[in-house]
Structure formats: C-alpha cells, structure tokens
Image (spheres, rainbow, N blue to C red):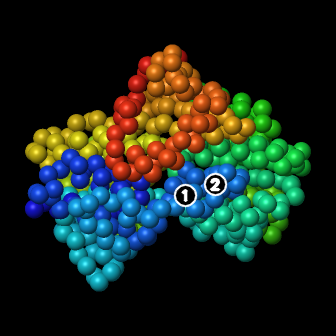
Amino acid sequence: MKKLVILGAGTAGTMVANRLSHLLDMSEWKITIVDQYETHYYQPGFLFIPFEMYSKNDVIKPKRDFIPAGVELIMSPIDVIEPEQNRVKLVKDNRILNYDFLVIATGAKINPEQTTGLQEHEWHKSIFDFYTIEGAVALAKHLRNWKGGRLVLNVVENPIKCPVAPLEFLMLADWFFQKQGMRERVDITYATPLPGAFTKPIAARYLGDILDQKGVKVETEFMIEHVDPDAKKIVSYDEREIAYDLLVSVPLNMGDPVIARAGLGDELNFVPVDQHTFLSPKYSNLFVLGDAAAVPTSKAGSVAHFAVECFAENFVRYTDGLELLPTFDGHANCFIESGFGKGLLIDFNYDVEPLPGRYPLPGAGPFTLLQESEVNHWGKMMFRWMYWNILLKGQELPLPARMSMAGKWH
C-alpha cells in the first residue's frame, strides 16, 4: 500500500485529494490529508464583505464536506516535516505519518506583525485588512458608520494572494461610496510597491486608466517602512509620507512557519519547486501546490485549479515509473469586479501577459478580456457556486488547463 500525505485542506489540497482519489487505484493507495482548522473559507468572497455584497455565512463551509470518501482527514497542527526520513510529525497525540509521496499545500497568510506600527493599538480600529474573515467583518462594521476622509490602500510587498484583489477593492470602494452618496467626501489613494497598477505592462495600462477614471490616485514604487498609527500616516523607505483617516493594508504574505522549521522555503517560507511539474529539486517524492509554491505565477484559486489538473495526471504517470512532463504553463485566469454591475477578466501564463480579446471562445466570448462588461460581473458572481460545487470537488471544467492564444489580440 503506497502512502500519499497531503498537508493542507485549503483550495489546492482539497482539489488534489479529490482528483487523485478518482485517478489512483484506491485499493493500492492510502491518501491522508492534514489540516488544523475545521472551516473552509471562500477567500475571493472576503473582498465583498466590507461592501455588504456578502456576509460571513456566504463564505464558510465545513472542510469535511469536501474531503472525498476513502481519504483520511486528520485535524491537527503540523509539528515538523522531515523529508529526509519521509515522515511528518503532528502535534496531536505526537502522531507520526510516514509517506511515500508528500504534497505540501499549506498556503499563505498575512503577517501584519512584520511591518512596524501596523498591528498595534489601531489594528481593526482605523487600520484594517480584508484578507482574513476577521478583518473583512471588522472593516464592514467600520464602513457602516464612516463619514469619509482619506482612504489609503497599501500593499506591503509582493507576492500576495490574488494580485488583482487590491484593484477590486479600490474600484468597489468608488462604487460603494457613490451608492452611499458620499463619494465626494472620500479621497482614495493606492500605495503600491509596483511601478504601475499591475505587474504586467499592458494590463497595468488598462487597469491604471480605469483607476484614473474612478478618481483613484496611485502612488507607485511605495515600499512601506513603517506605519505611524498615532499620526495616521504611512512612511516609505525613501521617506515619502501618505496621511490617512482609514488605512486598508494588504500585509506581507508568507508561507506557513512549518516550512521554515523544515528548512524547505525561501525567506518568505514559500517552497521552490519546478514551475512546470511542482516537484522539489531536493526531494524526488515531494511536491508543492497552491500558494505554498514559489513559482512565478499568481497565488490564486484559478492557478491552483489549473495546476492541480496538470499535476494530477502527471503524478499518476510519475508513480507508474514514467518521467514527469512539463505540463503546467503558469495559466492564471482572474475576474476583476469593478463596481456598478461590471467586471473585467484577465487570462495569462508564465510567458504571455494579459491581452485584450474574448474568452474562452474566439469572437463569441462570452467574456471580454481587459474590458469592463456585465457578463464579466456575472462570471465573477457565478464563480462562488462553481468553487463550492465543481472546483473543490475536483471536477473538470470545460476549459483547457493550459492557456490558449485563441481570441486574444496581440
């Protein structure tokens, strides 16, 4: 009996457990998945909570609902990963899990304590995040009674989960305050470490123009050094200062501390792996999927889905003694909610930046790329149902896992 251990029952871990339980002969395999939290969060929905589009109950379900029959789920923190010994030590009952193959899918989380002044006495009072359920709910409560002023959104450093989420927040803030009849009382500033609105030049131009049309000021190459919560200002390393009345932060994103304890990660606790196969360069039986992987694509649910589709069939080949194929191309696909019942869509990979066009069918779409439309908005809103009912359960979408140039203008 071969043993596969999956660490993390978030998006990537749950999807890979479902896919492999279908593809592997379960009379020959024992699959175990480990997580310490009972609740699964639909993380793209956190963004909607401050603007009263979703409530907390819209984004939570029990993790157990998505673990397939025949897969063992263990609820425990992980003490240490010992890849040299092919084993994982758990905190609960000091249990030891031996494995033949290990998939690490421990994700990423925010670390506000890494920025001086961020998580002090004003945390969740005049300084908020929306990358946690607690932060999103606290911000929603604050916005209900906020009278206006200087709203500053700051990204501390990249990479972050869902790189377009800050842009969505800014666009939705513009819409929300207009709906409340108070937009003229709110000054919105985006302080980003990037040289533009987005990481890729063409998309940065399109998205930057939209932010400009919505009256959002963009402060580029702003590398935050500290927050002064009493003076209510953020200060960069080059000594620029931005004053705020309400600061929304996207704190430093890091991998799980268990990665550091195992000596597997980079300085942010993300694990270097082959970007096409997700195999560790150091261990021939260790793979890393989802946000935990240090690969040059977005840390996003769509990436996890496309990656798992490529990985699962590759893994079956590999365990049958065949070589891994370089199948994953970095495909990412992100809806961007832009307010007023409209949205955008971007589609890109390691080599091709987001381009205008139509998706997934050339000419027909129905989705437009890098262009606002109502259809894109409904695609974004429909995604939650697809996430719970199709993606997490490891079912295939009628979309190719690898990016296609069909329908793109270049």
Q: Residue at x 49, y 47 (%)?
A: 385
Q: Residue at x 10, y 45 (%)?
A: 321
Q: Kindly identify the amino acid type of the residue bearing the numbered disc 1.
A: Val
* Residue 405 visible here: yes
* 337 or 315: nearer the viewer: 337
- Point out which mark residue 54 bears: 2
Could you tell which of marks 1 and 2 lies nearer the N-terminus?
2
Disc 1 to disc 2, C-alpha distance = 8 Å
- Point out which mark residue 59 bears: 1
Q: Residue at x 41, y 63 (%)?
A: 63
Query: Total label count?
Result: 2
Q: Is residue 135 left or right of residue 33?
A: right
**Residue 93 picture location, percent across and down:** 29, 83
- Point out which mark residue 201 bears: none
- Above or below residue 273? Residue 75 is below
- Above or below residue 180? Residue 225 is below
* Residue 290 visible here: no
Q: Are marks 1 and 2 in contact (CB under 8 Å)?
A: yes
Q: Secondary structure at mark 1?
A: helix
